[in-house]
Amino acid sequence: MKKWYDTLYTYIWVFNVGRGLAIFIRLPQNFGIIYDMGASDDFSPQDFIATHILPNLTPYKDERGEERALAQSILSHPHADHIYEMAGNDSCQDAALWTCPHDKEYPPALREEYKDERVDFKRVTNPDGSEDLIEEYRQAYRKRDLPLQTIKRGEARVPNVEYGIYYVRPPECDKMHPDSDQDYTNSTSLVLYLRHGKQNILLPGDITPAGLERVLTCDEGVERRYTFFTEGLGCEDDHCKTGDQPMLGETLQSCGLSILIAPHHGLESGYCEELQNHLGGGKPDLNVISEKRHIVEGEGTVDPRYQNEEGANGLTVDVEGSRESRYSVSTRDGHHILIAFKGTDGCPHVYLRKDAEDLINIVP
C-alpha cells in the first residue's frame, strides 16, 4: 500500500461539513496547511486531522526555531461556518503561522510600510450564540505578530510548487459594501492560490464577486503574500509584504485553472463572471462545492453554471470506486473529497468517499 504522504504529491482534502468549509493541504514537503475550520454535527475535520494526518506530518519550525505540528492555519474570514472548530482543538491550532482577517493595529514603526487592514467587528454578522466563538477567534490572533504571511521557503525547496494568499484590505471592503454587513464580512476572505506543476487550485472562501474582481487585478487595495518553493524565484520578502508577487489574474490567464473551490459554497450570489475572463482556458476543469445536505427555503441556490459545460471543462473523477465524468463535485450527498496533484501529471486525481478514512488508503 502506498502511503498517503508520498512526497511526489500535493494532497488537498475538502471535508463534508455541509454549507461550511474545512480544507486541509499537505504540501509535497510534508508540511500541513489548514484552510478554514468548519464542522458538522456528525463529523469533526479537526479530530480527523489530529488522528490520521498530524502524526504523519513533518513538523515545521517557526521563527523562534520551535517545532509546530502545522506550518499554517488560515481562516478565510470570521463567519461561524468557517471557524466553528476553533474551540477545543488545540492540536490543530498549533501552527507556526496563524493567518486570518484581524483587528490588530500595526506598531508605529510599521505603519508607513503597511496600510491599515483592521476588520470592523461591529459589521461582522453571525448567528445568535456565536459571541464566544468570535471572541476566541479574536483572542487567537492577538497572540500572533503582524504582518500576515505565507510560510518561508527556507530549505524546503521543491521545483514547480508555489502558493500565495490575496486579500482586499477590510477598509476597502467597507467602501465596496457599505450597506450589507454580510457582503462586507464575506469580502474580507483570504483567497489562496496553489500550483504544483501543471495543476493548480483556487480557494476564494466566501469572497464576493466584487471582491474577487479586485483580487484578480491586484489593485492598490489588495495585499499579496507568496512563496515560491523553486530555487531562484521570488524575492526575500514575498512571504510577508506586497511587492512584485504574481498578479493572480495574470497567473490564471497563463496557467488556466484545474480546480475551483466555488466561492460562497457555490451560491448564485457568489458567482463571479469576471473569473472566466482571466482564465486562459476559459473555465476551470472542475468545480468543487461545499454544500448543505438538506436545503431549506431561503438558504439560496447553487448556481447551475458550476454544474455544466458553461462553468467547467469537465474531469473524470472517482466516486466510491466508479469513474465518472463531472463538471462539478459536491459534499451534498455526504462525500468527502480528496484532490491529488502530481507535478508530472496533466490532470488532478479526484476521489469522493463517504467515509473519510477510505481516502487515506486509495490515493495514488
Image: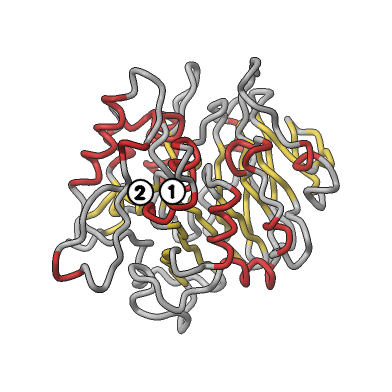
* Above/below status of 75 relative to 133: below
Q: Residue at x 45, y 79 (%)?
A: 244
Query: Where is residue 76 drawn, in percent x and y?
Result: 44, 45
What amino acid is found at the position of numbered circle 2 in the picture? Answer: Pro
Residue at position x 23%, y 73% in the image = 112
Q: Left or right: where does residue 353 sit relative to residue 118?
A: right
Residue labelled with disc 2: 101
Taking the spot 65% from the left edge, 16% from the top edge, the residue there is 297
Residue 306 or 169: which is nearer the viewer?
Answer: 169
Q: Which quarter of the figure has residue 332?
A: top right
Q: Tell me: residue 278, above or below residue 354.
A: below
Q: CA distance from mark 1 to mark 2?
A: 7 Å
Q: Name, please, the residue furthest toward the bottom.
A: 232
142 and 338: which one is in front? 142
Quickly name the residue at label 1: 188
Rate crowding at label 1 as few (under 14), some (14 to 19) or many (20 or more) other CA atoms within 10 Å: many
Q: Residues within 10 Å of mark 2 (few under 14, many from 20)?
A: many
Is 178 on the left-hand or right-hand side of 333? Answer: left
| Residue at (29, 25) in percent of width and height | 131
Q: Is residue 145 left or right of residue 115?
A: left
